[in-house]
Image (cartoon, rainbow, N blue to C red):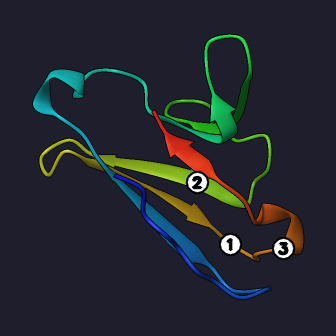
């Protein structure tokens, strides 16, 4: 289900992405905009350094939720994101 996350320029936000237990060992990532096979703009992926160091991902496998933190929010961060 879509979730709205609000933040202000210069602040930080957390995006929480719950998942089913069968995905526990899968890579997790956050896409900006569409997140289809051909067109993926991956902002951060588990186990890999983020392209932009303001994005970080932590995976709580016990609670089955991964969290993306975006620090130092900028105007260009606005938009739709997908947890995958």
Q: Residue at x 84, y 73 (%)?
A: 74
Q: Residue at x 69, y 86 (%)?
A: 11
- The 10 Å Cα crowd at callout 3, few under 14, some 14 to 19, many 20 or more, is some
Residue 7, image quadrant = bottom right
Nearer mark to the viewer, of 3 and 2: 3
Q: Determine whether, in the image, residue 19 is placed left or right of residue 6.
A: left
Q: Marks 1 and 2, how far apart in space?
A: 9 Å
Q: Label for residue 56?
A: 2
Q: Position of residue 75 (x, y in %)?
A: 86, 73
Q: Residue at x 65, y 53 (%)?
A: 80
| Pointer 3 or 2: first along the chain | 2
Q: Residue at x 41, y 50 (%)?
A: 58
**Residue corresponding to mark 3:** 74
Nearer mark to the viewer, of 3 and 1: 3
Q: Secondary structure at mark 3?
A: loop
Q: Secondary structure at mark 2?
A: strand
* Above or below, comparing residue 64 to residue 54 in the picture: above
Where's the C terminus, which quadrant?
A: top left
Q: Secondary structure at mark 1?
A: loop
Q: Label for residue 71?
A: 1
Q: Position of residue 32 (x, y in %)?
A: 69, 44
Q: Is residue 18 visible?
A: yes
């Amino acid at each position: 289900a879509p979730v709205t996350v609000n933040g202000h320029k210069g602040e930080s936000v957390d995006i929480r992405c719950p998942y089913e237990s069968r995905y526990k060992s899968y890579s997790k990532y956050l896409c900006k905009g569409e997140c289809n096979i051909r067109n993926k703009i991956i902002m951060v992926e588990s186990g890999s350094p983020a392209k932009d160091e303001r994005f970080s991902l932590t995976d709580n496998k016990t609670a089955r939720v991964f969290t993306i933190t975006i620090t130092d929010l900028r105007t260009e961060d606005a938009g739709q994101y997908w947890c995958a």
